[in-house]
Amino acid sequence: MAQMNYLTQCTFDFGALAQLPKVLKAHGVSRPFVVTDPGLKANGLLGTLLAALGEPPAGVFTETPANPTESASAKCAEAYRASGADGIIAFGGGSSMDLAKAMGLMVTHEGPFERLGGSKRGMKFITKIPPLIAVPTTAGTGSEVSPGAVVILDNGMKETFVSPHLMPVAAVCDPELTMGLPPALTAATGMDAMTHCIEAVLTPVVHPPAEAIGLDGAERIGKYIERAVQDGSDRDARWNMMMGSFEGALAFAKGLGAVHGLSHALGRIHALKLHHGTLNAIILPHSLAMIAEAGAAEEKFARLRRALGLPSGASLAQYILDLNARIGLPVSLSTVGVTEAHWPSTRDYAVSDIATLSNAIPFDGDKYEELFKRAL
């Protein structure tokens, strides 16, 4: 039996940031606490947000790491409690939004934090968190409309937390905030969104609305990602990339797959500091090849080809490989520092990742090892 859940309120277009005070008021937030990262403080975008607010927020946390951690979330939670805030603004990419969700859990739930994770089937313990309004500054994760958050725990595991209670109560999506995004980050975050759309379409979970949205998102990203990378001031490309990212997260209400399982497992390796979207881009074509070789999801492959404007029978794996090359992304895991020595500690994390459960074909440790070696 299918269970289909949508939707969070979204204010979307150039200039949407000006509506943030009205959105906060509509959700009863008078003393917001801003969660963001050092880069947005340095490049002035945090100042743009604060100017849009008009009134000073209850507090600001600018120490979100590239891969959110339990310890950073705990530090943020301590600052939130001390501020007297009554709601949260998550401002940034997926890292800031995921850390804001983790912080929201920490200020409303008793520990240990890891008991709430997906691998522990902790969803049933998650209840309401403070009102969270998400303002994305990248077009990639779609966390502004996602019920999930990914956090590296103190025990080293990269854990996914999933619950309808983690869905932001509202999103303010202003493509203007992505205009200064450099080409490499535009490419990596864009392929993160593409992976969301494609994996969501391919998963066997029944959710036709999400699948249709995933196809539309893949079409937009396929059409506009190269334009956005080549010319960051292309407003039409920026609008459509942010919409594609938004749609990717709506689509993965249906589930994800082994690309994310392996990407999460490798992303937990602190010494490598790997970007999630880059990992997804590298792994995706090899996962697609394995699914195609298994003869699975043939009808869905055909629908994806049509959405991406490919001829009948074209290789989706080769399409992604070629697209990655054109937008300047790494060709293999080895080029970003991953070695065979990283595999033994990665295997169990990948197998236990919640995304593995909804992969297009069953995946065990041996399948993951094959995927790892192909991508290496």
Image (spheres, grey):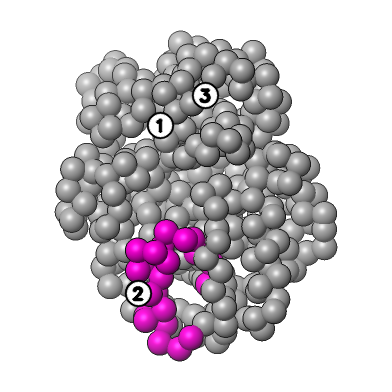
Above or below for 268 versus 24: above
Rendering coords of residue 33 (x, y %): 56, 76
| Residue behind mark 2 | 48
| Residue behind mark 3 | 338
Judged left or right of residue 292, residue 304 is left
Of the image marks 3 and 2, the number of the one nearer the N terminus: 2
Residue 367: quarter of image = top right
- In front: 38, or 95? 38
Check residue 15 for magenta coloring. no
- In front: 344, or 223? 344
Rendering coords of residue 329 (x, y %): 33, 31
Rendering coords of residue 342 (x, y %): 61, 22
Above or below for 123 versus 43: above
Secondary structure type for disc 3: loop
Check residue 47 for magenta coloring. yes
Most common secondary structure along the magenta stretch:
helix
Above or below for 285 versus 201: above
Q: Residue 281 carries which label?
A: 1
In the rendered structure, which amino acid carries the disc numbered 3? Answer: Val
- In front: 268, or 41? 41
